[in-house]
Amino acid sequence: MAHFTSFTAAALTWQNFYLLVGTAAATLVGLMFVALTFGSSLVTEQTSPTARSFLDPTFNHFVLVLLTACLVLIPTMGPALLGVLLLLIGVLRIVFLFRIYRHMRAVQRTTSDIEMSDWITGVALPLVLYLALGVTGVGFVTCCAQAFNALAAVILALLLLGVFGAWELLVWMAIARARPK
């Protein structure tokens, strides 16, 4: 396993990538607030659990991408600290994923509004990506040269999963708006 010789030099080559994905994530978080504002009339006491089942994972993906981009761009960040933080974030996201799972189970029991694709994109894929984030953190702690590539893959996958989740949310809002009152 190859190790990077200079973390700073390696991180510098990734600076534009993390500026780009961080900016995209921040923009998408803002757009989620706009979409939720426009669709707020659709979120009632009855639809709130379903809306949260779509909102929470998507919002969390975008925030995680933004946070990771910020961490990588900190000029004084070292590989050990970054690795430990990524490992902790991965573990915490897995713990919080159980809340999302419980939310989705409750919605499934009461409304049957959750499809198999929602389970895959809301729970299964995030679990795999959070585990990969933790492994990437270990890669940074051990100064593995492929850690930057692995982190980029995880971050891109989370960003794309968030985009897909945002699309699903908009479709749900359109269907909810079209339902007779």
Image: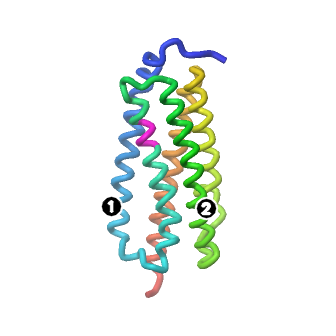
**Residue at figure coordinates x 39%, y 36% from the top left:** 70
Q: Nearer the viewer, residue 85 or 157?
A: 85
At horizontal 45% and vertical 79% (from top left) the residue drawn is: 45
User: In the figure, residue 87 lies in which quadrant?
Assistant: top right
x, y percentage for residue 122? 58, 57
Give the labeled residue for mark 2. Answer: 101
- Residue drawn at x 42%, y 74% as measured from the top left: 43
Position of the N terminus, as image quadrant, is top right
74 sits left or right of 93 in the view? left
Q: Which residue is mark 1?
A: 34
Dividing the image into 4 quarters, which one contains the C terminus? bottom left
Instruction: Provide residue 163's location: percent of width, then percent of height.
Output: 48, 52
Amino acid type, mark 2: Tyr
Magenta residue span: 65-69
Residue 109: where, in percent of width, then height?
64, 76
| Magenta span contains residue 66 | yes
Q: Position of residue 68 (x, y in %)?
A: 45, 38
Question: What is the three-letter code of the residue carrying label 1?
Answer: Val
SS at circle 1: helix
Q: Is residue 163 above or below residue 11?
A: below
